[in-house]
Image: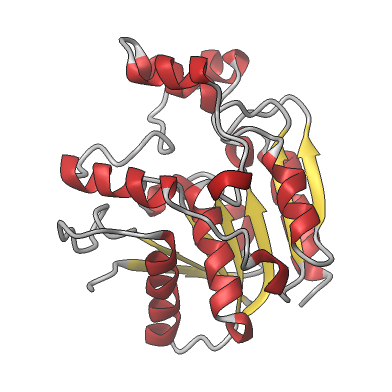
Amino acid sequence: MDIAHQVRGSGPALVLLAGQSNSHLWWEGVREDFETRHTTVTLDWPGTGESAKPDVPYSTRGFAADVVGVLDTLGIERAAVYGTSMGGRVAQWVAADYPGRVSALVLGCTSPGGEHAVERSSEVRRALAGPGSGRFLLELMYTPEWLAAHAGPYHTTGDPAMPAYARRRHLSASAEHDAWDALPGITAPTLVVHGADDLFNPAANAPLLTERIPGAVMHLIRGARHAYFEEFRQEASPLVLDFLDDRS
């Protein structure tokens, strides 16, 4: 499959994985935090951006194979992997299925999936399916104070050019994710990060991942919602960089 990818910066390789139904633009405005110390690699998920958009079933495990395919294309044998939201689900499979390729793992605002995961509440699900869902999604991503000070554009609410069928395929891929049985086999040093006020992907998933992955450590960002890495970048980016520096 034709997977568009982007490379910027210099230093040890760091793969940045975006959320569901989003292209590499998810990382705009944050990526520069990592570029002076890492060669950053992003990609457009199948169905988004400049990547191929086949109308076929997608899966987080299949997306992990796409990530490794990009690394192969670039001649990168080993990289740190930082995945957020659905990208964190994909990152779990990259680390579990290709342990020799991952030097360190950061899982942000994500979930193990399956019956062990903590799902968003029925109230949140209803609001996302109802009128005004676009504004409600923004409020799940960011605090009212941040939204009042930032008029957009917002890069975390989905690729607007994405075909409707691909959006449905992404939703299924994320919903069907279940890496619970694979998590204890992850050998990469792992940091779990989550916004403490995240209702979109409840923060209760963070300790589940931390306890399930051997040696993992956890950091909750107070006051942060789902897009903690953008709104709270002054805390989140140094946290991740320090973790990676200690393991490079």
At x 77% / y 54%, what residue is drawn? 210
Q: Position of residue 142 (x, y in %)?
A: 56, 24
At x 69% / y 49%, what residue is drawn? 237
Quadrant assignment for the C terminus: bottom right
Q: Between 230 and 68, which is closer to the camera in this rendering?
A: 68
Find the residue positioned furthest to the top.
131
Which colour scheme appears in the figure? secondary structure
Find the residue positioned furthest to the front.
115
Q: Between 242 and 212, which is closer to the camera in this rendering?
A: 212
In the picture provided, is 225 more to the left or to the right than 132? right
Q: Position of residue 112 (x, y in %)?
A: 60, 52
* Badge count: 0
Which quarter of the picture shows residue 91? Answer: bottom right
Which quarter of the picture shows residue 69? Answer: bottom left
In the picture provided, is 189 more to the left or to the right than 126? right
Q: Is residue 34 above or below residue 108?
A: below
At x 68% / y 42%, what residue is drawn? 205
Quadrant assignment for the N terminus: bottom left
Q: Between 190 and 234, which is closer to the camera in this rendering?
A: 190
At x 48% / y 50%, what residue is drawn? 86
Q: Is residue 230 above or below residue 4?
A: above
Any part of residue 163 in sight: no
Q: Is residue 128 above or below residue 82?
A: above
Any part of residue 159 in sight: yes
In the picture provided, is 53 more to the left or to the right than 235? left
Q: Position of residue 92 (x, y in %)?
A: 58, 63
